[in-house]
Image (spheres, grey):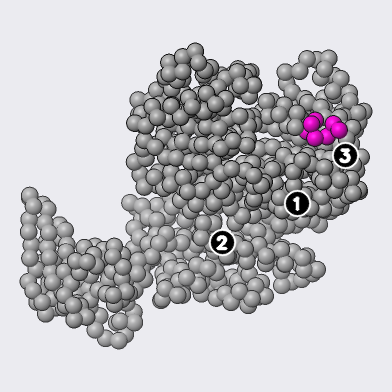
């Protein structure tokens, strides 16, 4: 039996009561205990005073050269001060509410204290005290200098967890199996798994603790990458797709005829997409790019290429109005080449819908644009070769199943305007290939971004009025639709009333919020798009919306209530025409994180830089939200700091899967067993 799977009660010192308390922390087996990693470390190593920065934690040893001085404040509060001689310098140690230590500290005694260092005052605010200092060499060598701190509970203390871990290692260290192939351990110079688990709980030096964490974080990342890349390999083998013999010269001619030059990023993404379309396996690719990076043009060229191979294409949008916009754009680009573009929406009359569906089935319509209605039961294609999904739709297993039941294996391209740092993208979308548009077309003017307080709202209104008088349009965004007793935020209804009063009959002020029906929302957006509405007050329902090049002002009220990704997407609603656009953030954040968000928005318009700094602020879990499917949960690895390990793990997993004898060699038996446990090996063998 695998000793690691034994119940935690087999560890000496853990009874049934403590086992129940440990279970509350997710610890039920020996494996769970050994892999219950510290959340942080406290370093008690003695350092030179000059090496420690102001505000850092410090541990010092010194000789007491004056009696402790105690002052009392009220009945229970006290402040005790002791002067110590440390490295020929005098350091003042201060304790709060620990005056009982006075009787244990004597002149001439050597003591050790740890706490916050105030360099300018040469004083330390003490959090821990040692009045007994080890004297012998053996005692000093056994002294714990780096102390791991674990997530604990009222029923299980940190000290108890440390004691249980020490006992578990004594009993079961020899049962810790190596799971990384020898070639990887040698190439990456990793310590053994047994050494790593021992060192991460009981590091004898900072360097060894770092090595242990590096090894174990890599291990998590490697097995996740192995699973996702093997899954992708199986999908490609099982999904033969529709290989397209694309005549490249007509595609090149189409690109040359565009009224602008493609960016290098667009050219790179197109090459990757066209290579996939011509391959034997079905494409499953993510095209990510900042707002305005030219994803729609890349999609148009890909759809044109599919038609040149005799196939049909479909573009799926999240809303009907966005589908209408895409259909208009594609018609303008493709109609001159004799291609038929159809639009399938829920609001179509029955006769028009029947005619469109008939044209699709007979192959008379080359490209169809719509919402999820495109994969309904009554929609049939003559030869569907490429499906493109826009914005939040990720074409998943269920959608593929629907198409397979219709006898279709189309290539799939998913587009998103939410930039994701590459390190996170290759984890979250590890089962997809990723193309990135990381540059904007020439001539785009950066959006000027300002952060102001609410008392400047009158000046903001005057600026909006100036832009509207020049024929431009503006968005004003509010975070909530109704009053909240707990959160004092300005709602869309109040702001709308305020703006209607301000502009009077000079300009039309529209309102868009989440309680409106889909038809009501789309009617308002059509009026705004046609400039029948000059100022649109809205909640974030316009975050993914219609393209209005004439809109040059984005005002976000209570901007601190929004996340960075939301703010950047909202800002991207303007700056789509040739005129200079402006984003004004009205905010009074109460936290440093909130203020940092505003500074980031002011400092950069680059969506990937915004995403990178957002990831650093929030961590990957919050970055995607707790309900985001696909985001792996690691015990130790941290995608905000383990960039290098992630890249190495990705490369190593790919190299191993390319090894000819991976599926048969005994050296990879554990990896194959892992894939079998994940249900992937069986899929591969059945192919």
- Does residue 527 appear in this view? yes
Q: Which mark is residue 307?
A: 3
Instruction: Please state the horizontal and vertical placement of residue 42, each as a whole percent of the image.
Output: 35, 66
| Mark 1 or 2: the one toward you | 1
Magenta region: 330-336
Check disc 1 and report its element: helix, strand or loop. helix
Disc 1 to disc 2: CB gap under 8 Å: no
- Residues 171 and 295: in front is 295
Is 249 located above or below residue 106 in the figure?
above
**262 sits to left or right of 145:** right
List the residue tagged with mark 2.
643
Query: Is 209 a magenta residue?
Result: no
**As drawn, 242 above or below 103:** above
The secondary structure that dominates the magenta segment is helix
Q: Residues within 10 Å of mark 1 (few under 14, many from 20)?
A: some
Residue 395 marker:
none
Give the percent coordinates (x, y) of residue 545.
62, 30
| Left or right for 650, reference 160 | right
Left or right: residue 70 versus residue 518 is: left
- Viewer-nearest residue: 108 or 437: 437
- Horizontal relation, residue 677 to residue 165: left or right: right
């Amino acid at each position: 039996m695998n000793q690691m799977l034994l119940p935690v009660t087999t560890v000496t010192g853990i009874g049934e009561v403590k086992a129940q308390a440990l279970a509350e922390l997710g610890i039920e087996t020996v494996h769970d205990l050994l892999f219950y990693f510290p959340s942080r470390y406290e370093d008690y190593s003695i350092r030179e005073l000059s090496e420690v920065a102001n505000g850092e934690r410090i541990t010092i040893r010194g000789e007491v050269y004056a009696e402790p001085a105690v002052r009392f404040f009220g009945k229970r509060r006290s402040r005790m001060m002791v002067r110590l001689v440390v490295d020929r310098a005098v350091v003042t140690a201060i304790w709060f509410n620990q005056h009982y230590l006075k009787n244990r500290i004597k002149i001439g005694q050597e003591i050790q204290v740890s706490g916050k260092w105030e360099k300018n005052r040469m004083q330390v605010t003490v959090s821990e005290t040692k009045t007994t200092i080890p004297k012998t060499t053996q005692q000093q060598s056994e002294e714990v200098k780096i102390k791991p701190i674990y997530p604990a509970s009222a029923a299980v203390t940190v000290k108890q967890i440390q004691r249980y871990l020490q006992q578990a290692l004594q009993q079961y260290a020899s049962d810790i199996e190596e799971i990384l192939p020898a070639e990887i351990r040698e190439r990456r110079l990793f310590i053994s798994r047994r050494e790593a688990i021992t060192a991460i709980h009981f590091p004898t030096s900072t360097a060894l603790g770092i090595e242990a964490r590096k090894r174990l974080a890599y291990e998590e990342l490697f097995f996740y990458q192995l699973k996702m890349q093997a899954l992708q390999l199986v999908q490609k083998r099982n999904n033969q797709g529709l290989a397209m013999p694309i005549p490249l010269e007509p595609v090149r001619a189409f690109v040359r005829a565009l009224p602008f030059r493609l960016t290098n990023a667009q050219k790179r993404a197109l090459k990757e997409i066209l290579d996939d379309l011509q391959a034997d396996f079905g494409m499953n690719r993510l095209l990510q790019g900042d707002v305005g990076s030219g994803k729609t043009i890349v999609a148009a060229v890909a759809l044109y290429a599919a038609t040149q191979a005799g196939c049909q294409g479909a573009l799926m949008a999240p809303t009907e109005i966005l589908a209408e916009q895409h259909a208009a754009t594609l018609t303008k680009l493709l109609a001159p080449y004799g291609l038929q573009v159809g639009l399938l929406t829920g609001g179509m009359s029955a006769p028009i819908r029947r005619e469109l569906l008939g044209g699709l089935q007979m192959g008379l319509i080359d490209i169809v644009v719509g919402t999820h209605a495109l994969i309904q039961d009554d929609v049939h294609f003559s030869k569907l070769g490429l499906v493109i999904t826009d914005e939040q739709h990720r074409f998943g297993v269920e959608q593929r199943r629907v198409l397979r039941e219709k006898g279709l294996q189309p290539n799939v391209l998913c587009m998103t305007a939410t930039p994701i740092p590459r390190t996170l993208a290759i984890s979250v979308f590890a089962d997809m290939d990723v193309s990135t548009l990381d540059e904007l077309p020439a001539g785009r003017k950066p959006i000027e971004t300002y952060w102001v307080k609410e008392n400047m709202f009158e000046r903001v209104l005057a600026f909006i009025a100036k832009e509207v008088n020049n024929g431009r349009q503006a968005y004003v965004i509010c975070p909530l639709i109704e009053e909240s007793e707990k959160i004092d935020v300005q709602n869309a209804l109040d702001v709308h009333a305020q703006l209607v009063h301000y502009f009077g009959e000079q300009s039309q002020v529209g309102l868009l919020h989440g309680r409106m029906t889909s038809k009501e929302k789309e009617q308002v957006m059509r009026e705004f798009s046609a400039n029948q509405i000059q100022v649109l007050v809205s909640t974030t329902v316009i975050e993914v919306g219609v393209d209005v090049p004439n809109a040059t002002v984005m005002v976000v009220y209570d901007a601190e209530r929004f996340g960075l990704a939301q703010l950047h997407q909202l800002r991207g609603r303007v700056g789509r025409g040739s005129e200079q656009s402006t984003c004004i953030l009205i905010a009074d954040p109460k936290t440093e994180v909130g203020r940092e968000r505003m500074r980031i928005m002011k400092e950069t318009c680059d969506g990937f830089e915004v995403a990178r700094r957002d990831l650093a602020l929030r961590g990957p879990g919050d970055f995607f939200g707790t309900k985001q499917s696909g985001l792996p949960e690691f015990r130790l690895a941290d995608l905000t700091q383990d960039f290098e390990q992630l890249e190495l793990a990705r490369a190593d997993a790919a190299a191993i899967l390319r090894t000819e004898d991976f599926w048969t060699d005994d050296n990879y038996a554990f990896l194959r067993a892992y894939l079998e446990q994940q249900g992937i090996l069986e899929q591969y063998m059945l192919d």
